[in-house]
Amino acid sequence: MYVPYKMRYSLSTHVRKRSSPPTRATMVRTSGPDTMLLLTLAAVASGPVAAYSWPDPKIDLLESILYQQNGYRQYGLAFGVSPCTNMANMQETGRDDSAEWFRTAYHDMATADVQTGIGGIDASIGFETDRPENKGKAFNETLSFILAFQSARSSMADVIALGGLFSVGSCSNGEVIIPFRGGRIDALEAGPTGVPQPEEDLDTHTAAFARQGFNVSEMIGLVACGHSIGGVHGENFPEIVDVVDDINNQASRQDFDETFDNFDNSVAKQFVANTTQNPLAFGHNETTRSDFRIFNADGGELIRKMAESQQFFWDTCTTLLERMINTVPKGVKLTDVIEPIPVRPNNLFITVNPNGTQTISGEVRILEDGVTSANRQVLIHLKSRDGKNISSNPVVATTQNGLQVVGYYKNLPSFTSYTFTTTVPTTVGVSAFDVQLKDGNTDITNTNGGGGFPFQDALITQAESTCVGLEFFSTKSNNTLNISVAVRDDMEFDTVQLWVPKPVNMIGTFSTRFEPTSTELSKTESLNGTGYSIYSGSYWFTVDSVGPMKTFDLFASGPNGVVYNNFTRWADFNVCQ
Ligand code: HEM
Ligand SMILES: *[C@@H]1O[C@H](CO)[C@@H](O)[C@H](O)[C@H]1NC(C)=O
Ligand SMILES: *[C@@H]1O[C@H](CO)[C@@H](O)[C@H](O)[C@H]1NC(C)=O
Ligand SMILES: *[C@@H]1O[C@H](CO)[C@@H](O)[C@H](O)[C@H]1NC(C)=O
Ligand SMILES: *[C@@H]1O[C@H](CO)[C@@H](O)[C@H](O)[C@H]1NC(C)=O
Ligand SMILES: *[C@@H]1O[C@H](CO)[C@@H](O)[C@H](O)[C@H]1NC(C)=O
Ligand SMILES: *[C@@H]1O[C@H](CO)[C@@H](O)[C@H](O)[C@H]1NC(C)=O
Ligand SMILES: *[C@@H]1O[C@H](CO)[C@@H](O)[C@H](O)[C@H]1NC(C)=O
Ligand SMILES: *[C@@H]1O[C@H](CO)[C@@H](O)[C@H](O)[C@H]1NC(C)=O
Ligand SMILES: *[C@@H]1O[C@H](CO)[C@@H](O)[C@H](O)[C@H]1NC(C)=O
Ligand SMILES: *[C@@H]1O[C@H](CO)[C@@H](O)[C@H](O)[C@H]1NC(C)=O
């Protein structure tokens, strides 16, 4: 049985509330590096947890973007809508990213036809911004912000869904936590039309929502949830609300309710009380009073219930919005709900030293589930290349201030990272490790389901001699990777390759697609006395602006096997001098 994360960790939420959150001033808008890692710690008191085994290419990056929000190795997507009133575009007042990202998610989904399985959240909205049904700058500005989180392992469609999820999470301060599944696939062209427009009649709207998979009650609920934040802009809909001359409201927004920046039930309360604020319910233009027609479609029953109970409103929205973001084209198979990974490695690196040793370094990120004492010990048990315990003395991993990461709103997990480094002879090598957690009376060794966390040493990027370059010309950037890889001689590889998912711009959208490209690396040096050789090469591509998240994969094959070392972020390396 699936136990929602929010319920399982309510304890830790309360613990966390007492400590003061990091101040906004210390937040950095960059995303920290991440490799491709994760695992499970089974059987916590709270019941069955799906057995993860690290790494999982479908889960790991999305888990980071979802939960590593604020602090160490944070991903800045949630930051874009935290607080709810945040607006990246400083040029214009009267707009909020949260409302715009949320509306973007709905408009991407709104053309879905669940009978034929066409459409849903697939990033096709990017190709559809010039349509009358998608008025305004919101869609392109949303895509150009969230583009930084698109990657070979996070489709634009997944990022659009996350954007909507973060918006309601932030604007409700964690009261609405939508379970997230990954695996959406990006469309490569526009889809059909069909986003509801305010001047259409109730029958048209009822039919449009039925096509999207929502009956009349669900239509009422979904529209009430959608119109809990933001408003109607005179800039986009002058026939609905007046254009005003106000330096604090340059887009001429008239808010849906008196708490446009709070995902709450006041839109329903105000409607039931007949107040005049919501332009789509009581605006001067009767033709465009679509909220009025929709909220009364069942005689006003559901909107009254939503007005009466804040909790009922939130629960209704959680259920309906989860369905909204999980509406995907036929054939797309979403992952299980992505839960916080209790113990997961990050940023594992190995450097081969000239004196016949290798320096092994990495981090383990531990979920704070509320049971940690001040003297927790984290011990790394390395296994040699041939799978034996390296020594009876485990490597001690340590933490310090600044290695914590928390959520921007309530009901999210927090984590602490522990870093380790050690040196072993290259003749011994490494193949995996276990993580022992000693804390008070508990002493748990996490073996990643039995075999340990894999840590191959046959094909390893040498961080000190790898660098990345970024040059701008006109509206484009030139992105260079100069890479140096240590390759174990005993593998006798026939080929060592660098694979880069090259971002390619598409006409008519800010979203990109990825084209797999390979480059043969060549042997440039023997590291005498270590059993390793250096292979190197370089690769460059150009893309509009800075483009999406850049990563690379390594691949080598030979008589003794095939080795992959996938999804390393360019951002983990120094800038070329
Ligand atoms: C019949 C259905 C709907 C109609 C006719 C409709 C119409 C509109 C209109 C005209 C605006 C003003 C946009 C602007 O001026 O920038 C708006 C804003 C908005 N809509 Fe809807 N909408 C509908 C359903 C939904 C649903 C189901 C959701 C989400 C679940 C949603 C989310 C939003 C949000 C968040 C805004 C505020 C945007 C902002 O302030 O930038 N809408 N809607
Ligand atoms: C819509 O479907 C829900 C179940 O999802 C059901 O409870 C509700 O009665 C239905 N409403 C209408 C008007 O059919
Ligand atoms: C009311 O809205 C409709 C539909 O957008 C438009 O055709 C009409 O001109 C508007 N009326 C006024 C008075 O703005
Ligand atoms: C709101 O208006 C409707 C229709 O005019 C009326 O039936 C209802 O009593 C009014 N509600 C309040 C709270 O004034
Ligand atoms: C070998 O070199 C590494 C890196 O410079 C150093 O950390 C290590 O102590 C050296 N080991 C020996 C046995 O000299
Ligand atoms: C190897 O280390 C693990 C802990 O990581 C321990 O459980 C196991 O018993 C050790 N095996 C041997 C043969 O010492
Ligand atoms: C991009 O940079 C690489 C080297 O860093 C260079 O060889 C290449 O010509 C550049 N491409 C363009 C289009 O400027
Ligand atoms: C959004 O951006 C795309 C791609 O640059 C462009 O084709 C489209 O016209 C833009 N839409 C709007 C409304 O500016
Ligand atoms: C490594 O050995 C090769 C031949 O065995 C020799 O040509 C080369 O100079 C040596 N390199 C270093 C750095 O010692
Ligand atoms: C690793 O990357 C290569 C090349 O991009 C790809 O063909 C392979 O399927 C990937 N393997 C895994 C396990 O992700
Ligand atoms: C990157 O590699 C290329 C070719 O190997 C070389 O010409 C260039 O100087 C390198 N750039 C930097 C900044 O290291």
Image (cartoon, rainbow, N blue to C red):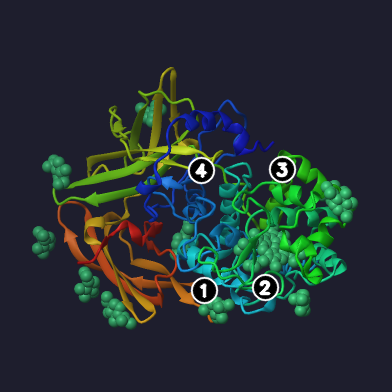
Q: Amino acid at mark 3?
A: Asp
Badge 3 density bin: few <14, some 14–19, many ≥20, Cα 10 Å:
some
Q: Closer to the camera, 276 or 374? A: 276
Residue 53, label in figure: 4
Residue 404 lies in what quarter of the image? Answer: top left
Residue that sits furthest to the right in the current view: 299
Count of marks placed on residues: 4
Measured in 3D between alpha carbons, the distance from the residue under mark 4 to the one under mark 1, in whole angstroms, is 35 Å
Q: Amino acid at mark 4?
A: Ser
Which residue is disc 3 drawn over? 315
Residue 237, label in figure: 2
Viewer-side label of 3, 4 = 3
420 versus 170 height, above or below: above
Viewer-side label of 4, 1 = 1
| Residue in the picture at 62% in, 29% down | 47
Q: Amino acid at mark 1?
A: Phe
56 versus 547 height, above or below: above
Viewer-side label of 2, 4 = 2
Which residue is disc 1 drawn over? 510
Mark 4 or mark 1, earlier in chain: 4
Mark 2 or mark 4, earlier in chain: 4
Q: Amino acid at mark 2?
A: Phe
Badge 1 density bin: few <14, some 14–19, many ≥20, Cα 10 Å:
many
Mark 3 or mark 2, earlier in chain: 2
Can you tell me whether the CB of the residue at mark 2 lies under 8 Å from the nearest atom of ligand 1? Answer: yes
Q: Is residue 250 left or right of residue 565?
A: right
Percent from the top left, x then y, of residue 344?
44, 41
Can you tell me whether the CB of the residue at mark 1 lies under 8 Å from the nearest atom of ligand 8? Answer: yes
Q: Is residue 3 visible?
A: yes
Percent from the top left, x then y, of residue 42?
54, 32
Mark 1 or mark 2, earlier in chain: 2
Mark 1 or mark 3, earlier in chain: 3
